[in-house]
Amino acid sequence: MTDLTLAQAQAIATQSLAVARERGFKPMAVVVLDARGSLKAAASEDGCPIVRWKVAFGKANVCVNFGAGGRRVDSIARERPHFFAGLESVIGDGGAVPVPGGVLIRDADGRLLGGCGMSGDTSDNDEAALVAAITAAGLVADCG
């Protein structure tokens, strides 16, 4: 397996929102990108502030473009803010949100399939919903 399928991306988006509902999280937005950074699936729940999908996209985008999960990106942004500021300019229009809640999607052999971002609750809760959904899809979550 080398590509993230539309069915997998939609399953991750749907399942992450289901996990958020089960756990009583605030209204969420989720974005799933393939390994090229191309949009595969996205959804925003009713009552979710409009900016949340942009934050979710920024979390996924920085992870895919940098090749690291949100926790690693967060660490780099804290340790080397000048480097991260430069990274943001290179990544461009998609944005870069350097916090947990951005997760890489890998296959069982560790190959990068894509990344996803979620926003609406705490960063830890955003990440937890994504990890549960990626695992349920039979894939490997890489938080960094």
Image (tube, rainbow, N blue to C red):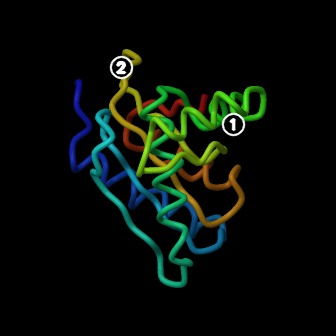
Residue furthest to the top: 109
Check if mark 2's residue and mark 1's residue have beta carbons within 8 Å: no
Residue 91 picture location, percent across and down: 45, 39
Above or below, comparing residue 121 to residue 33 in the picture: below
Residue nearest the observer in this picture, 94 or 100: 94
> Which quarter shows the C terminus?
top right
**Residue that protrudes farthest toward the right in the picture:** 79
The residue lying furthest to the bottom in this view is 47
Q: Nearer the viewer, mark 2 or mark 1?
A: 1
Q: Judging from the image, what secondary structure is the residue with disc 2 in? A: loop
55 or 135, nearer to the observer: 55
Question: Which residue is rendered at x = 39% and y = 67% of the image?
Answer: 43
Query: Circle 1 sits in a helix, a strand or a loop, which is it?
Result: helix
Number of numbered markers: 2
Q: Is residue 13 left or right of residue 75?
A: left
Residue drawn at the location 65% of the way across and 64% of the way down? 23
Task: Give neighbour class at mark 2: few <14, some 14-19, many 20+ (Cα, 10 Å).
Answer: some
Q: Residue at x 44, y 44 (%)?
A: 61
Q: Identify residue for label 1.
A: 74
Nearer the N terminus, badge 2 or badge 1? 1
Q: Is residue 11 above or below residue 49?
A: above
Q: Tell me: residue 42, above or below residue 36.
A: below
Name which residue type carries label 1.
Answer: Asp
Q: Position of residue 28 (x, y in %)?
A: 54, 68
Front-most of 134 and 119?
119
Quickly name the residue at label 2. Answer: 111
At which x and y percent is residue 73?
63, 33
Q: Is residue 49 left or right of residue 57?
A: right
